[in-house]
Image: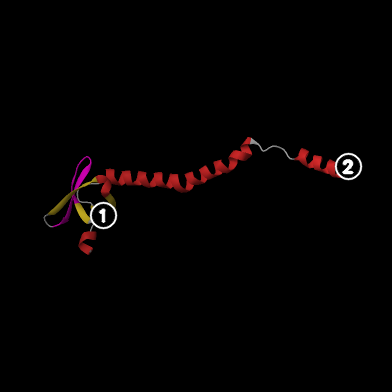
Amino acid sequence: MHWLIADAMAQDAAAAPPSVLGSFLPMILIIGVFYFFLIRPQMKRAKEHRNLVSGLSKGDEIVTNGGLLGRVTEVGESFVTVELADNVQVKLQKHAVASVVPKGTIKAS
């Protein structure tokens, strides 16, 4: 019986308290995964969209977030005027532009 108590005490002595780093390591890894797989790519897409919007010029053919295809006829500070068809022009906020398509896309469609 004495040897059972000695074994139990030896097991308790071997178990050390967890370190602070060991307890925060999973949280640090989760934050790292979120940064590299979610936050960083989103920041990259936002930067690309900012560059796209700032580079708009008259004559560019664009697609809006709503799916409208048209040609830019006027560029303002925060708005663009887009010609959708003959004598049909709409004014859009710049951030509503989804992409710039190659010239000639309107005639091809």
Label 1: how many Cα within 10 Å (few below 14, some 14–19, many 20+): few
> CB atoms at circles 2 and 1 under 8 Å apart?
no
Instruction: Count how many numbered circles sit on residues in the image.
Output: 2
Question: In the rendered structure, which disc, 2 or 1, sits on the residue that comes first in sequence?
Answer: 2
Residue 26 picture location, percent across and down: 58, 43
Q: Toward the viewer: 13 or 79? A: 13
At x 40% / y 44%, what residue is drawn? Answer: 43
Mark 2 vs mark 1: in front? 2
- Residue 75 lies in quadrant: top left
- Quadrant in which the N terminus appears: top right
Residue 49 picture location, percent across and down: 33, 46
Q: Is residue 55 visible in this depiction of the protein?
A: no
What residue does disc 2 label? 2
| Residue 60 relative to residue 32: left or right | left
Q: Secondary structure at mark 2?
A: helix
Residue 7 picture location, percent across and down: 83, 43
Residue 40 picture location, percent across and down: 44, 44
Identify the residue at the far right of this view. Answer: 2
Identify the residue at the far front of this view. Answer: 1
Q: Amino acid at mark 1?
A: Gly
Label 2: how many Cα within 10 Å (few below 14, some 14–19, many 20+): few
The vertical placement of 95 against 20, above or below, is: below
- Give the magenta range: 72-85
Q: Toward the viewer: 35 or 83? A: 35
